[in-house]
Image: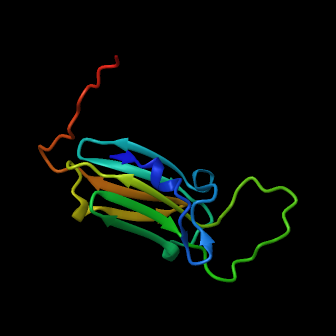
Amino acid sequence: MYYNQSCAAKGNTQGNRSLFIRSMQRAAVNIYKTGNSYEMLVFAPGRIREHFHLDVNGNELSVSYTPPEGFPRPDWILREYSRGGFKRTFTLDDSIDSSAITARYAEGVLQVSLPVIAGKQALKKEIVIQ
């Protein structure tokens, strides 16, 4: 599984909202591997579970959040955190069972479980630097 930086940098929008402005700051992601899955933790406190969207298209997993209309926007004195929209895209390799991906949102963290197909290893190739 790989993070696809080029997708996040394209600057696409959904409606009038840009989902990519400061997306790295709005939803930090940690990924770790267990014996039978990859576990993705999307740190997104203060969000509403129903406004997250996960989508698998081919070998790409997109995780996005769109805040509800009319969400209050105060005049900030200091702002180090945003609860705005974001979109993160990750490339899934052939070892991920995309039909069995699950997710849950609790205590400000969206946990996405990406099960590995038993016996299937991701292709690994060493690149020689010349």
Q: Coloring scheme of the render?
A: rainbow
Percent position (x, y) of residue 100? 24, 63
- Residue 55, picture quadrant: bottom left
| Residue at point 32%, 47% (across, down) | 38
Viewer-nearest residue: 24 or 38: 24
Looking at the image, which residue sits at the far front?
130
Looking at the image, which residue sits at the far bottom?
70
Looking at the image, which residue sits at the far left?
119
Percent position (x, y) of residue 50? 49, 76
| Residue at point 38%, 42% (across, down) | 32
Viewer-nearest residue: 62 or 74: 62
Task: Report whether 73 appears left or right of 113.
Answer: right
| Residue at point 49%, 65% (across, down) | 64
Task: Report whether 8 appears left or right of 93.
Answer: right
Q: How many marks?
A: 0
Q: Is residue 59 above or below residue 126?
A: below
Q: Is residue 121 above or below residue 15?
A: above
Task: Report whether 67 appears left or right of 104.
Answer: right
Looking at the image, which residue sits at the far top?
130
Task: Report whether 96 appears left or right of 16.
Answer: left
Q: Is residue 32 above or below residue 124?
A: below
Viewer-nearest residue: 35 or 63: 63
Viewer-nearest residue: 15 or 42: 15
Q: Quadrant of the C terminus?
A: top left
Percent position (x, y) of residue 42? 49, 55
Percent position (x, y) of residue 54? 40, 67
| Residue at point 39%, 53% (across, down) | 90
